[in-house]
Image: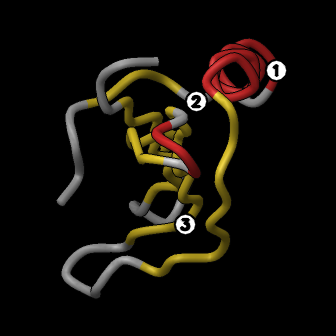
Amino acid sequence: MPKPLWLVRPRPDGGCDYVSFLPAQGPIGATTVEMREGSHLPPQLPLLKHRKRLGAEEAESCSRRLQLESGFLSSEPLF
């Protein structure tokens, strides 16, 4: 997963849940991905719920699962 990926799922209240996958450097130059999960209801500031680091293959699998099973869609960055 070489470039940032944003996934968004609209909510009935006009806000959305989001998951972003951002490239990060791990130990000894290993490429990892930082996964951030949160919600956003404009004009409020986004709420970050969880953050963790994943290996590139695990991040790819997680993003596919979120899109297939949880209704997330690919999006431009929210902020």
- Observer-side mark, 2 or 3, equals 3
Disc with the residue nearer the chain's start (2 vs 3): 3
* Residue type pointed to by label 1: Glu
Name the residue carrying label 3. 38
Residue at image x 23%, y 52%? 78
- As helix, strand or loop, the secondary structure at mark 3 comes to strand
* Residue 51 quadrant: bottom right
CA gap, disc 3 and disc 1: 18 Å
Which numbered circle lies on residue 69?
Answer: 1
Disc with the residue nearer the chain's start (3 vs 1): 3
Q: Which of 1 and 74 is in front in this view?
A: 1
Which numbered circle lies on residue 9?
Answer: none
User: How packed is label 2: few (under 14 Cα within 10 Å), some, or many (20 or more)?
Assistant: many
- As helix, strand or loop, the secondary structure at mark 1 comes to helix
Name the residue carrying label 2. 72
Q: Do the residues labelled 3 and 1 touch (CB within 8 Å)?
A: no
User: How packed is label 1: few (under 14 Cα within 10 Å), some, or many (20 or more)?
Assistant: few
